[in-house]
């Protein structure tokens, strides 16, 4: 009950103008490009060090342990999805959402 329902804005891709789709209301969601830039201001803070469990589940990890992770923003077109790459840089062009090489980092808002 402490996990808030959040108005999740389906923002267009800021670099390519790709339509973000429909807004939703969710308790658990992925960050958009702009949210990743706002809440995780530096590339260093956006680096993802996956857990051992996530690595075992077929995620891809490049030494020294950083991995790619999905954002909810579309990529260059609606067949691609934006992501954060191993050095913490946001790749707005995107990748095909095959699910086998990119981690999921869910976001929530909670009531204290």
Image: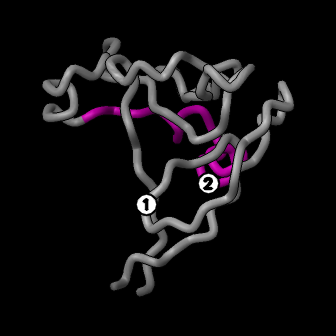
In the image, residue 44 lies in the stretch drawn in magenta:
yes
In the image, residue 35 lies in the stretch drawn in magenta:
yes
Q: Position of residue 25 (x, y in %)?
A: 56, 67
Q: Where on the picture, by quarter, is residue 9?
A: bottom right
Q: Position of residue 101 (x, y in %)?
A: 36, 17
Looking at marks 2 and 1 on the same chain, the residue that comes earlier in the sequence is marked by 1
**Image: magenta residue range:** 34-50
Q: Position of residue 88 (x, y in %)?
A: 55, 28
SS at badge 1: loop
Q: Is residue 27 above or below residue 83?
A: below
Tell whether 50 sits left or right of 5.
left
Q: Which residue is mark 1?
A: 28
* Label ID, residue 39: 2
Residue found 73% across the figure and 42% down from its top? 20
Please state, as top left, top right, bottom left or bottom right, where the N terminus lies in the image.
bottom left
Q: Where on the picture, by quarter, is residue 65?
A: top left
Q: Position of residue 37 (x, y in %)?
A: 68, 44
Tell whether 8 sits left or right of 11.
left
Residue found 58% across the figure and 41% down from its top? 72
Q: How many tags in the picture?
A: 2
Crowding around mark 2 (Cα neighbors within 10 Å: few <14, some 14 to 19, many 20+) is few
In the image, 59 versus 20, the foreground residue is 20
Residue found 47% across the figure and 78% down from its top? 4
């Amino acid at each position: 009950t402490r996990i808030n329902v959040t108005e999740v804005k389906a923002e267009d891709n800021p670099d390519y103008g790709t339509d973000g789709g429909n807004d939703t209301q969710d308790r658990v969601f992925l960050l958009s490009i702009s949210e990743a830039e706002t809440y995780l201001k530096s590339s260093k803070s956006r680096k993802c060090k996956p857990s051992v469990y996530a690595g075992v589940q077929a995620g891809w990890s490049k030494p020294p342990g950083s991995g790619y992770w999905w954002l909810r923003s579309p990529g260059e077109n609606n067949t691609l999805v934006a992501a954060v790459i191993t050095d913490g840089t946001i790749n707005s062009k995107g990748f095909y959402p095959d699910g086998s090489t990119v981690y999921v980092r869910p976001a929530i808002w909670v009531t204290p």
